[in-house]
Image (cartoon, rainbow, N blue to C red):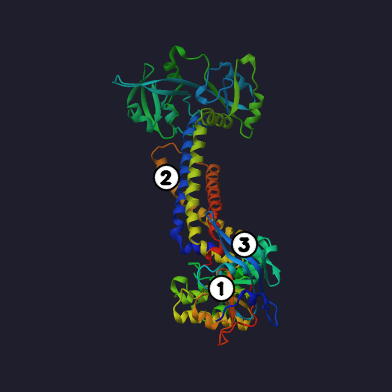
Amino acid sequence: MSFITPSQRAQTTPKRAVAPTLEARRVNKSFVTGVVRAQVLHGLSASIYPGELTLISGPSGCGKSTLLSLLSGLQAPDTGEVRALGEDLAKMDKRALERFRLLHTGFVFQGFNLFPALTAREQVQLPLGYLGMDNRKSAARALQVLDEVGMAHRADLRPAQLSGGEKQRVAIARALAKEPQLLFADEPTSALDAENGQRVIDILHRIARSHGTTVLCVSHDPRAVRHADRVLSMEDGLICNDWQPADTLGRAASGAHVS
Amino acid sequence: MIALARKTLVYEWRRFLPAVFALGFSGVLLTVQAALVLGIFDSAALYVSESSADVWAGYPGTQSVSFGRAVSPDVEMRLRMDPDVTDVEPYQWVESDWHTAGTTGGTVGVYVSGIRTQAEGMLFSELLPSGLRQRLDEPGAVIVDRADLDQLGVVIGGRGDIGGHQVRVIDALPGLRALGGVNVLASLDTARRIAGADAPRGATYYVGKVRDGVDPATVRARLKPDRAFGPFQVWTAPEFARQSQHYWLFGTGAGVAVLFMAVIVCVVGAVVTSQSLMGVVASSSREYAVLHALGASMVALGRVVVEQACWVGGLGLLMAGVLSAALLSVAGSQDVPVAMNLRVSLLCAALVAVLALVSGLLAMRGLLRANPAELLR
């Protein structure tokens, strides 16, 4: 892993055949606690591309989850611009943002956050109902996605009857059911054992490759780093390294675009 | 669409129980309170509602049956002059004191109703079984409510004293309890003897029977005040009953007190129910937050909460209905003055439903915690 100096940052530009699906341009974000204002992101820019599992890693408090929340439209930056699928998220009102998330985004969180009363199949069906899909179609779609994450045989079980790894796979299926172009995952493996963590990372990787989905994952799990297509290392609210783990030398990626 | 509200309610029913109980008991309180009010204030009009007379003639402006003043015996003639009035009888109202025989203790205020003793008598015809009315012909014979026997210190067949005149209780009936005193049924002669020198020349009321098929309101409209017969006013039986109840309910402040209690019941019910529901919503806030992140609007999530409140309201209503019916049945068997009608029971049910809805809307505050950004670490 190598670090990019400020002078290098200004010169680096992406060299990709496809346009980025997620872009942050000189975004700043701060939070106020009491009378203290903490600046979390400092004029950060980044471009994320489809068909890749992009990982944001870094120490606690470096701003990686904040960056994820801005790129997914869950929060707005103080200044700067965030574009998703070519649209400026800042120009959308609350309803338009909800609609955008409904149509285009999936989320996987560290906590599985499954409804205790619903079976695995119903958990996956639930968001499809908000898209207007009838129960028969959504049930078929749910089984298909559960099969994709290896959970079809557990479709009729409730969360209390599932292991942590299984719950997370159901959560991934729930996020995937809508066939989102953008999939955001926040520490999806940190509550899982090695085997289940590996399986979840494999699934996220496969989704990016087979569906052309933009998968943006926040994690400090080294297993996730090894399987990512691209890693953005953050520190103190800035991306300090943009590299591809496939490059065994860990050189700074040629497509790095940081500021 | 997956029935999230219903499935959660079924699976996590224990967490919804406090809300169901809160609504159920609010419903029971409202219903029992309304039944007691109806029962108590119905007794203000029982003289009318338990009689078969169609029109009542009394002193102008009388607010309640028990406030009657004597009218001239000519009023009876005026009623009989109407072609559609087929029968007329006097009603003598006397207020006096009851002394238990053989004691020198305190007295009990009684309302003596002097009525005609012939079998075709209209007054209290709904209460008096066949034959009992004629037995009032015996001088000093009286009938009281069975629940008042203890208060009067007498048994059936026992004697007492009203206004210095000895009387004998020949029977005791249910449904005769009065508001603020004890009702005593007697013959017109017995009542006049008790009234003594205070007995008016006419009667407190003259009640009339209207020919079958004729609207009593038409007869009442014809029987306009006429100075030639002395001061009098005519009401149809339902009008006079309603007027008597309304006086006690709204003219005495009792209605305001009841309304105040109902408001308190509603407020307490809404607070407890909404807090219970909000606890359930708040405990699922992370799951709701994920749904919101996935694009479910806050309006859609709010609908889930309100649907849950409606289910809770329905269950609370069911519980209130069963419990209230059981309680009112027990109360009725113990001579507690309770009454219920369809309109009031529907009103109570509507209040519980509104309570559930308001609680659901208040519980939606719990969704404010469903902020997806909070799920990111």
**Looking at the picture, do discs 1 and 2 lie on one chain?**
no
Counting the numbered discs, the total is 3
Q: Check disc 3 and give the amino acid type.
A: Ser
Q: Which residue lies furthest to the left in this view?
A: B102
In what element is the residue under mark 3? loop
Dot 3: within a 10 Å radius of its alpha carbon, few (fewer than 14), some, or many (20 or more) residues? many
Residue A146 falls in image quadrant: bottom right
- Residue closer to the observer: A77 or B368: A77
Say whether residue A255 is visible: yes
Q: Check disc 1 and give the amino acid type.
A: Met
Between disc 2 and disc 3, whose residue precedes? 3
Residue A29, relative to residue B356: is it above or below?
below
Dot 2: within a 10 Å radius of its alpha carbon, few (fewer than 14), some, or many (20 or more) residues? some
**What separation in Å lies between label 1 and label 2 (alpha carbons)?**
69 Å
- Residue closer to the observer: B53 or A185: A185
Chain of the residue where label 1 is placed in the rendered structure: A
Chain of the residue where label 2 is placed in the rendered structure: B
Chain of the residue where label 3 is placed in the rendered structure: B
Contact check, label 3 and label 1, Cβ < 8 Å? no
Dot 1: within a 10 Å radius of its alpha carbon, few (fewer than 14), some, or many (20 or more) residues? many
Q: Check disc 2 and give the amino acid type.
A: Leu
Residue B85, relative to residue A166: is it above or below?
above
Residue A176 falls in image quadrant: bottom right
Camera-side mark, 1 or 2: 1
Residue under numbered circle 3: B297
Q: Residue at x 51, y 73 (%)?
A: A187
Say whether residue B50 is visible: no
Camera-side mark, 2 or 3: 3
Residue under numbered circle 2: B327
- Disc number placed over residue A234 in the picture, else none: 1
Q: Where is residue B214 in the image (x, y as percent from the top left)?
A: 64, 32
